[in-house]
């Protein structure tokens, strides 16, 4: 009957392929978010400095300093966040394993109730749990998934996550600063904003692909945030020196 119901089936290797695909999506997500911040924050910095001083050397120094500091901060932040998530994940699985060892009957009944809540009849739920409980590993995996809502394998790779975020931030941060190497600051400001907005639109579309969102809408949202950041930074750099009496 099962074979008749499932006329087509995928090969067992498909499970591994799906896990690898999800892993790649997670890495792309780190790259996208790192690049997005790498565009927005330096844009605000160089725009404000350009508005305040209109001096290419000062803008370049400020932009490079922010890019390096920002990349290091983002990389270490991503590393620590991924490491903390992994540690919490492992600790929760350890607790679940201990609970099964110390109170197997309670965990057995709890799993039956969870299957009942999902729509199985009592007898069917008991049969399913009985089969799962025959394998300690399967029982632990099912309890972790059903009760805690997590996978038995710890998520993320802290070192890779940190490197992906830091490098994507650093590479993206070059774009807002780039025009100041070749064009006078007053003109470079507009090229910087324009190039960054184009890059932000592309980043927004990439993020939409990862998150399965509308491409154009996501691109425009990120672009709008970048435009506000650039304009806000320029206005801040233009008027703040006058307010503080620097000019």
Image (tube, grey):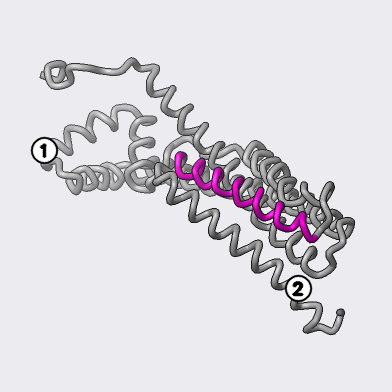
Which numbered dot is residue 205?
none
Which numbered dot is residue 238?
2
| Horizontal relation, residue 25 to residue 42: left or right | left
Note whether 153 is above or below 243 in the view shown: above
- Please state which of residues 57 and 25 is positioned toward the viewer in this rendering: 57
Residue 164, horizontal then vertical, whole percent: 65, 39
Picture mark count: 2
Circle 2: element type: helix
Circle 1: element type: helix
Residue 61, horizontal then vertical, whole percent: 86, 55
Q: Is residue 187 visible?
A: yes
**Magenta residue span:** 186-209
Between marks 2 and 1 in the image, the one whose residue lies nearer the viewer: 2
**Residue with the mark numbered 1:** 123
Residue at position x 52%, y 43% in the image: 90
Residue at position x 35%, y 17% in the image: 12
| Horizontal relation, residue 17 to residue 35: left or right | left
Question: Quick one: quadrant of the C terminus?
Answer: bottom right
Asked whether residue 207 is drawn in magenta, I would say yes
- Please state which of residues 211 and 136 is positioned toward the viewer in this rendering: 211
Assess disc 2: are there few (<14), some (14-19) or many (≥20) residues with their C-alpha within 10 Å of its C-alpha. many
Residue at position x 68%, y 58% in the image: 41
Q: Is most of the magenta stretch helix, strand or loop?
A: helix
Note whether 156 is above or below 63 in the view shown: above
Residue 76, horizontal then vertical, whole percent: 70, 49
Residue 28, horizontal then vertical, whole percent: 55, 37
| Horizontal relation, residue 77 to residue 246: left or right | left
What is the distance, in whole Å, between disc 2 and disc 1 at their CAs? 73 Å
Question: Quick one: quadrant of the N terminus?
Answer: top left
Residue at position x 79%, y 65% in the image: 49
Point out the tag, 2 or 1, that comes first from the N-terminus: 1
């Amino acid at each position: 009957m099962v074979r008749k119901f499932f006329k087509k089936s995928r090969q067992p290797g498909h499970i591994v392929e799906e896990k690898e695909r999800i892993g790649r999506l997670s890495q792309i997500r780190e790259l996208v978010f790192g690049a997005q911040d790498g565009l927005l924050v330096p844009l605000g910095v160089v725009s404000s400095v350009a508005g305040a001083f209109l001096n290419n050397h000062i803008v370049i120094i400020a932009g490079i300093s922010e890019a390096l500091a920002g990349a290091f901060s983002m990389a270490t932040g991503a590393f620590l966040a991924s490491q903390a998530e992994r540690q919490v994940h492992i600790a929760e699985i350890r607790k679940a394993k201990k609970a099964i060892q110390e109170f197997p009957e309670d965990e057995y009944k709890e799993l039956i109730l969870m299957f009942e809540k999902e729509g199985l009849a009592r007898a069917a739920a008991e049969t399913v749990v009985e089969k799962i409980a025959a394998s300690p590993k399967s029982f632990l995996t099912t309890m972790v998934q059903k009760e805690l809502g997590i996978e038995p394998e710890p998520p993320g790779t802290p070192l890779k996550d940190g490197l992906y975020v830091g490098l994507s931030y650093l590479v993206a941060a070059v774009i807002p600063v780039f025009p100041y190497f070749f064009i006078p600051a007053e003109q470079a400001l507009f090229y910087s904003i324009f190039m960054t907005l184009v890059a932000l639109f592309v980043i927004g579309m990439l993020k939409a692909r990862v998150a399965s969102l509308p491409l154009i809408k996501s691109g425009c949202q990120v672009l709008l945030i970048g435009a506000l950041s650039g304009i806000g930074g320029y206005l801040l750099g233009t008027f703040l020196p006058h307010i503080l009496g620097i000019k």
